[in-house]
């Protein structure tokens, strides 16, 4: 990276912080009085992260699943509850050794307290339906970093185990990759968090619980810095 590239990257990070500070008061004012249903047009964002045995939803195992529910409190979006499941690989799936090296998951460790894939997915859907009811929303919308990856694995696991009443929108997601690219000028979770002023511990990365927590903090930071538009974003 050249000196100029470094300077530009530094300016982008500083610009993100300045923009966040400038927008925060306006965003908070715009969010006050809104409930989460009104803020997201009847959809309830639920942050999801998974760890898998590979990249192919139909053949690779789901190994970890984590969810963070959200709430609006005084106009500020924040994490509400965190849930995590360690999952025993489904017998019809496989696990690549390279994936275990990245995640650090030891499938033979009894302390994982792994549960069957069907149980984890069923419990997730049940708690999300509960949150939808409490928030008076019409549906949940899966929110994740590279969200279509998580969405595809989750839907495939549900179908594989015959788990019905999927509470998530069937094709729409909220992706913090895209949001961070616009708001912070970077799409990698670690760097986007750093630019948003969120401390990120790389030693804890690639755990579904930790990555879901960081994704939730990043999503909330972007939403809280983004004013609710009262008119067109682009004025003639």
Image (cartoon, rainbow, N blue to C red):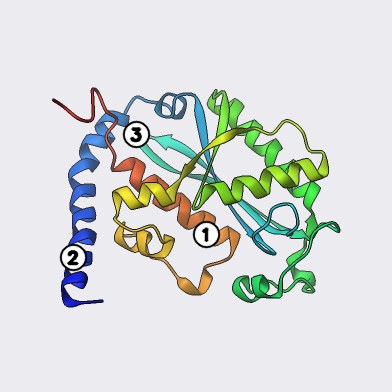
Viewport quadrant of the N terminus: bottom left
Give yes or no for contact between labels 1 and 2 (Cβ–Cβ under 8 Å): no
Q: Position of residue 168 (x, y in %)?
A: 61, 34
- The local secondary structure at tag 1 comes to helix
Compared to 12, does 97 lie above or below?
below
Q: Is residue 142 visible?
A: yes
Q: State the residue in front, 234 or 206.
A: 234
Q: Tag 3: Cα neighbours inside 10 Å, few (<14), some, or many (≥20)?
A: some
Residue wearing tag 3? 75
Left/right placement of residue 4 relative to residue 170 reads left
Residue wearing tag 2? 8
Dot 2 or dot 3: first in sequence order is: 2
Viewport quadrant of the C terminus: top left
Compared to 173, does 114 lie above or below?
below
- The local secondary structure at tag 3 comes to loop
Dot 1 or dot 2: first in sequence order is: 2
Q: Tag 1: Cα neighbours inside 10 Å, few (<14), some, or many (≥20)?
A: many
Q: Position of residue 148 (x, y in %)?
A: 55, 47
Which residue does the image show at 23% across and 22% down from the upper left? 231
Q: Position of residue 95 (x, y in %)?
A: 74, 67
Residue wearing tag 1? 211
Which residue does the image show at 77% across and 41% down from the upper left? 159
Foreground disc of the pair 3, 1: 1
Give yes or no for contact between labels 3 and 1 (Cβ–Cβ under 8 Å): no
Which residue does the image show at 77% across and 63% down from the upper left? 113
> As drawn, which residue projects farthest toward the right?
91
């Amino acid at each position: 990276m050249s000196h100029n590239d470094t300077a530009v990257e530094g300016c982008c990070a500083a610009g993100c912080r300045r923009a966040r500070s400038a927008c925060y008061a306006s965003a908070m004012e715009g969010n006050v009085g809104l409930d989460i249903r009104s803020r997201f047009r009847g959809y309830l964002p639920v942050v999801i992260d998974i760890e898998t045995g590979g990249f192919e939803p139909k053949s690779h195992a789901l190994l970890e699943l984590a969810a963070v529910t959200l709430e609006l409190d005084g106009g500020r979006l924040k994490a509400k509850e965190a849930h995590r499941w360690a999952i025993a690989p489904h017998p019809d799936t496989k696990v690549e050794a390279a994936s275990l090296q990245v995640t650090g998951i030891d499938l033979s460790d009894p302390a994982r307290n792994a549960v069957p894939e069907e149980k984890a997915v069923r419990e997730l859907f049940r708690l999300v339906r509960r949150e939808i009811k409490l928030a008076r929303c019409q549906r949940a919308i899966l929110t994740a970093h590279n969200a279509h990856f998580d969405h595809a694995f989750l839907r495939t696991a549900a179908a594989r185990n015959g788990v019905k009443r999927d509470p998530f929108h069937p094709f729409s997601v909220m992706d913090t990759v895209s949001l961070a690219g616009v708001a912070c000028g970077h799409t990698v979770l670690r760097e986007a968090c750093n630019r948003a002023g969120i401390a990120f511990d790389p030693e804890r990365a690639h755990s579904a619980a930790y990555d879901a927590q960081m994704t939730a903090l990043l999503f909330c930071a972007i939403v809280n810095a983004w004013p609710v538009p009262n008119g067109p974003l682009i004025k003639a």
